[in-house]
Amino acid sequence: MSVDHPQGKVKQHCVTSDAFLGGKLNVCQPEKGFRAGVDSVLLGAAVDDDVKSLLDLGAGVGVAAMTALTYCPGSTALLAEIDPEIVEIGHDNLHDNGFVTRGTYSLIDIMSSGPERVAQGMAQDHFDSVIANPPYFDEKTVSLPDDNYGKRAHAHAIDCLERWVKAAVSCAAAGGEVIFIHRAAELQKLMKYYDRRLGNITILPITSRPGQEASRVLVRGYKGSKAPCKLLSPLHLHGSEGREFTPQLQAILMGKDKLHW
């Protein structure tokens, strides 16, 4: 469900109100540019069951973090986001969905220095789980949205992905998980950065339909682990025909089950 309405405090963005997890979450987000959807829900639903402290890098309006908070009722979250107007929307989302005592926004550039990140709450060696949906594209290879939030969410500088992985690993506690969702075409690069710093890496390809190439991957690794890598069978969004989601994905999107992987 999506209802357009203006946001009085927000200068740039006209926002919509959208239902996630079968109505468990009602989230305001910009009408144009980057919009949270299936990727954000999958990222939040991928978090381990027993997580107590979560860090969401590039949290946007908070869909991934609030999905994780919904599935992990004993957890708290720090949501790191660079855009002050999106932080304002996201904070309202936390309040409106009953997470204001469990979630906190930090206005921070993930690409900033370690001491700057720490000063904004991104403590080193602290979080049980660090999740990220980083910009998917090289800024020199794609046409970008007009708004600054959309530009940052869609595209990155050449060394962005490695610096995001470094920041995520530095904030993860010993034994903590680091989960990224990204384009399947970038898996080789992502694995290079993961393999230097994490172990027990699990790769979940995401395809639109059976028999098609993966378009996305979920990748999880554990800080301090030396266990080998695992490649799972693909997660299909749809069956061979039709537009309906598979029963597994439908259960996740409707808030009836998390991702077990």
Image: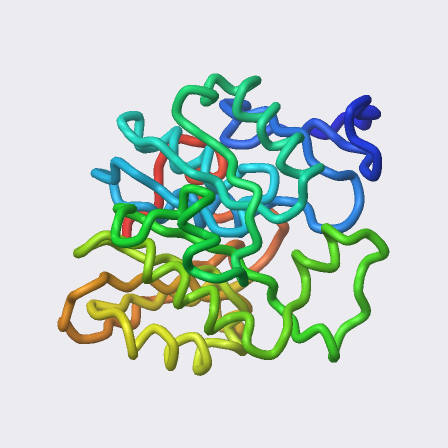
Name the image quarter holding the C terminus: bottom left
- The residue lying at 34 percent from left, 31 percent from top is 76
Q: Nearer the viewer, residue 109 or 199?
A: 109
| 161 relative position to 55: left or right | right
Q: Position of residue 182 (x, y in %)?
A: 51, 65
Q: Nearer the viewer, residue 122 or 59?
A: 122
Q: Position of residue 36 (x, y in %)?
A: 62, 44
Name the image quarter holding the N terminus: top right
- The residue lying at 44 percent from left, 29 percent from top is 103
- The residue lying at 57 percent from left, 42 percent from top is 107
Q: Which quadrant of the view contains residue 114?
A: bottom left
Q: Nearer the viewer, residue 95 or 136?
A: 95
| 261 relative position to 133: left or right | left
Whether residue 248 is visible to the viewer of this picture, yes or no, is no
| 175 relative position to 236: left or right | left
Q: How is the image coloured?
A: rainbow
Q: Position of residue 98 (x, y in %)?
A: 47, 17
Whether residue 10 is visible to the viewer of this picture, yes or no, is yes
Q: Position of residue 65 (x, y in %)?
A: 45, 39
Number of marks? 0
Q: Is residue 163 above or below residue 237?
A: below
